[in-house]
Structures are given as C-alpha cells and as structure tokens.
Amino acid sequence: MYYNVKSDIKQLKIIMKKYDLVIQNGIIIDGKRTPRFKGDIGIVDGVIETIGKVDTGNAKQVIDAEGKIVAPGFVDLHTHFDSQVFWDPWCTMNSWHGITTVTIGNCGFGFAPCKEEDRDASMKTMERNEAVRFETMKEGMPWDWESHPEFMDSIERTPKGVNMATFTPLGPLMMYVMGKEAAKTRKCNDEERKEICRLIEESMEAGSLGISAQRLGESSVQRDSDGTPMITDLMDEDDFIEFAKVLKKLGRGFMQVLGGDFDFNERLMEASGRPMIWNALVTIADQHGLTFGSLWEITDWIEKCNAEGKRVVGHAVTCPTDYQFQLIDFNLLDSDPDWRAVTTGSLEEKMKKMADPELRKPLKEKFNPKHTFIGSMAVNIHELRYGEGDNIEVHNKYEGRTIDEIAKTENKHPIDVFFDISISENLSSRWVTPPQKIDMEGMSRLANHPFSVPGLSDGGAHAKFLTAGCYPTYFLATLCRDNNVMSLEKAHWKLSAYPAQVAGIRDRGHLTEGYGADILIYDLDELEIFPMERLHDFPANDWRLVQKAKGYNYIIVNGEVTFKDGECSNETPGLFLRNGSAKGKKVNLKTVDAA
C-alpha cells in the first residue's frame, strides 16, 4: 500500500489540537487535594483546555517543567491595592510570591463612591490609615469615577498583571450619602439608610463580591487622618444589620469583617444569610498588633457558628509580621491617646509635639519594659533596634544598637532616646523590631484548622513597614518544606482553592479544564524569601519596603507568563472578576513598562 507521507503529516497537523501554551512533564498539584501526578497542561485563550498527555506539535509555546511543581496561582483575599494597581499593574510584591488573584475594598476602606470635592479627604484618610502617601496617590490615581460601579469599570480597563475582584467598602458609601462628620456621630435616617442599601445593591449588581467593614470601636488602631476612628468603627449596629440584609435579598455575596463583637457578628450572618470572612486569626499578634483575645477561644466560636449554620471562616496570619518603620509614617501607636497626641499631624507638628517634655511625660509614666505592647505595637520601645536614617553621623553612631543599649550608654530614658534620635533625622530614623519567635506547634494547629484561610497580606498598604505579601512562600518553604506542617496537596488547596471558594471566585483557584490558567511552576527546594529592601519606585519619588522571592520559575496569569525567574515579562493579562468570574472575557494583552 502506498502512503503519501507529506500529505498524512499535513492532515495530522490540521486535526492536531492547537495550544497557545503547553506545560510539559510537570509534577501537577492541582489544588483540589488530589494526589500529585506527572502530566501536561494545554492552554488555549487563557483557559486550561487539557490536563493529561498533550501533543505539542501545534503549540505556540512549550515550557518543560521536568522536576518542577506545577500548581494553581495563589488567591489573596485581603489586600489594599485599590490605589497601587493604577501605577503597578502586577501588584508587587505579592505577585513576586505567586499571588495571581487579589481582592480589594477590604476593611470598609476604599475610594468609591466619592464626590470630586472629597477626593483629597479620601486620600488623606488612606495616607494615615494605610501609610500610602497622599502625594503618591495624587499623582498615581486617575480618579475617573464617582460611583463604585464606575470605579470597577476603571479597574477593569486598567492593565493588570493579576486578576482582581472587589468588595464594597461601607465607609465610602456612608461618607458619600451622609458626609463624614454625620457618618461618625449618628445613625442613618430612613432616607440615608435606604440610599446606602440601594448603593450596595447597585455595586453588587455591577460585580462586587460583597460588603466589608472594620469594627474596632473607639479604641481602633487604624484611624482617620484627624486621629478619630474610621467610619465603620463607629457605625451603628442597626444600620449594619440593614446593610447585611441586602445580601439576603440578592441571595449571594460575602461579608469581610475585621474585629467586632462575636454576638453581633452572629447577628450579621443571620441577617445576611451569607458567609463571613472574619479577620484575624493570629498566634501572637497580627500586623496591626491585634490579637482579639485567645486564639483557640476564637476558633471554638468559629466552629460553633458553623455547626449552627452560620458560616464563617477566619483569615489567618501564617507568617511572621516583623517590621521596620519611621515615625513619619507609622500608625500602630494610634490606639493609645497619649501616643496619638504626638504621632498625628504634619511632619513639623509631629516633631514639635514629640519634643514637648509635657507630652513625653505620660509616655514615660506608662513605660514598662516588662509589658509586651506599646499602644498596638507588638513590641516594647526599648527592644527596637536603630536601622538607618538620613543623617550619616547619627547612622554611624547608632546603627545596629537597641534603644535599651543606647539608653543605658547615654543615661537617658528610652522614650527620650526614641524621640531625640528620630527628631534629629526629621523622623526618617528607621526602627527595626526584633524577629518574632514563631510557635511552630501553634502555627501548625492554626494553619491546619478546618475553618482557617491563610492570607491577610495587606498588600498595597503599610508598605513603609510591612512585607506580609511573602506569606505564600513562607507557607510552602518554612511551614511545609522545613517543618512538615502539612502536605503540599493540602497547602495548595489552602492557598488557592479554599480562599477562592470562600469569596465566591468561581473560575480559578485550582487546575481544572475550563478554568482560568493561573499557574505556578516552581522548585520547592529553591524557594526562598530575600531580606527586606527599600525600593524608590512609587509615584512622587516615594519608596516602599519589599521582600523578593527565589524559586518561582514561571508565574502565569490567564495563560500568559508574567514573571520568569523573578523577571517581569511586561505582560498584563489580568482580568477584573465581576461576581467572582471572568467567564466570557477576552484576555487583556496590553503591555506597559515594567515596575
């Protein structure tokens, strides 16, 4: 029999499946707690088309993942990239650590809805609350919206290197309808309450995941620009119950709540009929210095709620929250009125107040080196170590020394040392907290708890002193690889599929045919978190602290490589997830200059 070899090969190529990208020979951990297996993944139009043995003959790109782990991108449910995404499409540093989907609008904070005349006030609130400088936001944000749906439209058309979804923050809604002063001092009247409920429903219909609020009361550590608590800290309980009922009316959505009385949180869940993502579960103290009492009493409460049909998961802090800070930006002392008296205001006002002996006096009186906390800072002043500053003589004299050591050498009170050095450098002195001692047994129990979801990076916020966006790398490398806290199969479910499920993100989070191709290729043995460094890469020549990662060979978002061995590809294939889904959307292939 005669065979036309050229014709047969041509015909074979016609019927052979065409793939944009094939990942070959990887050790696949699919995020569904399925045992790992060796296989290939074929991707078409940003979606996983085939998992199995894939023919690469018609593939546009092939990545050989031999010996590497292939897993779903991480899902981070607690960020504040609401402003940073406009000048940093990849939402770094989180994306350097394998995070491919983020949610914004957390804690009841945000920039929409917002009237034009309130924009400056909105940015100044976030400057104090989240340590993003006003000038940075002023230069970096387009402000091409007023309503929250218009803000979502702006996010959607902005090039992104990660997928993004949003909650509806209640603070801006209340300010928009009532004005800030009224929102902080009284209940809504009937008309205002109806209008806020209408705006929540409008936002949900436009694609929001749900509603969010911080509930820390009068002693809130995260405060407004004038030093008062945030709007939702003071929100009337009856108003919040009515806002929650909108979710029951719609039959969907989630609540993200920071703090709050447990009994009231149960009332919220009953009123909404919807799940709650509660912040935060911590073994010692979270990045805001908060513990919310005994961790295991909280997990008992969460278990009780779920047994009774009130669905709640706890957002867990599963990495150290060591930090470095300068008094020009730091706000974790704000819960204490005596500290707040000297740490709010302009730079000149702060320096003048910090130099005042009368304002120092109550701080000295309450200073006790045996106490763990100062304000809401999870270390005492005397334990802080001088890192660096703008004055070379001061730097050379004090570098690496603790305040306690300096105080004993110079025969001064630690409070005087803290303020005197800071003032001498216009509050640029960087103070470094001692490394946290992690109770690995407690961390293992927390990480493995059935109702805990790791995360809480606060990415986009506190970038002057916090680098919690490294949590996925710490989870895999330190908890799993070095301490055998759990299997990688369970870890990837915890880091990707579980948080996606918790927030209603419906087309990604695990490696499944028909799901978005958000994929990591990494070498477990090589995973490493680099030391903190300062980058001057924000608008208005502003800086931030970051920690980069090693070991991620490829980070892929919607089938496009965004990072290869830590280098940005400049591709921005991220999608805005309306109601938790990007189904039916074309992958955005716009490119912008790398950050």
Image (cartoon, helix red, strand yellow):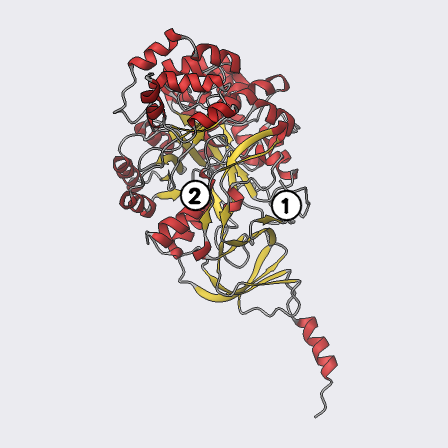
Q: Is residue 559 visible?
A: yes
Q: Write down the residue under mark 2.
A: 471
Q: Name the spot of residue 524 as percent of width and height, x first.
A: 44, 56
Instruction: Work out how far the residue at label 1 is from the one at label 2, CA to CA, in angstroms.
Output: 23 Å
Is 592 on the left-hand or right-hand side of 152?
right
Observer-nearest of 98 and 490 = 98
In the picture shown, does residue 525 fall above or below 78?
Answer: below
Q: Is residue 186 visible?
A: no
Q: Residue at 62% of width from left, 34% of height from top?
A: 86
Q: Write down the residue under mark 1.
A: 572
Say few, some or many: other residues with alpha carbon within 10 Å of mark 1 (under 14 / 14 to 19 / 20 or more). many
Say few, some or many: other residues with alpha carbon within 10 Å of mark 2 (under 14 / 14 to 19 / 20 or more). many
Q: Which mark is residue 329?
A: none
User: Which residue type does callout 1 highlight?
Assistant: Thr
In the picture shown, does residue 117 fall above or below 525?
Answer: above
Q: Name the spot of residue 254 as percent of width and height, x first.
A: 44, 37
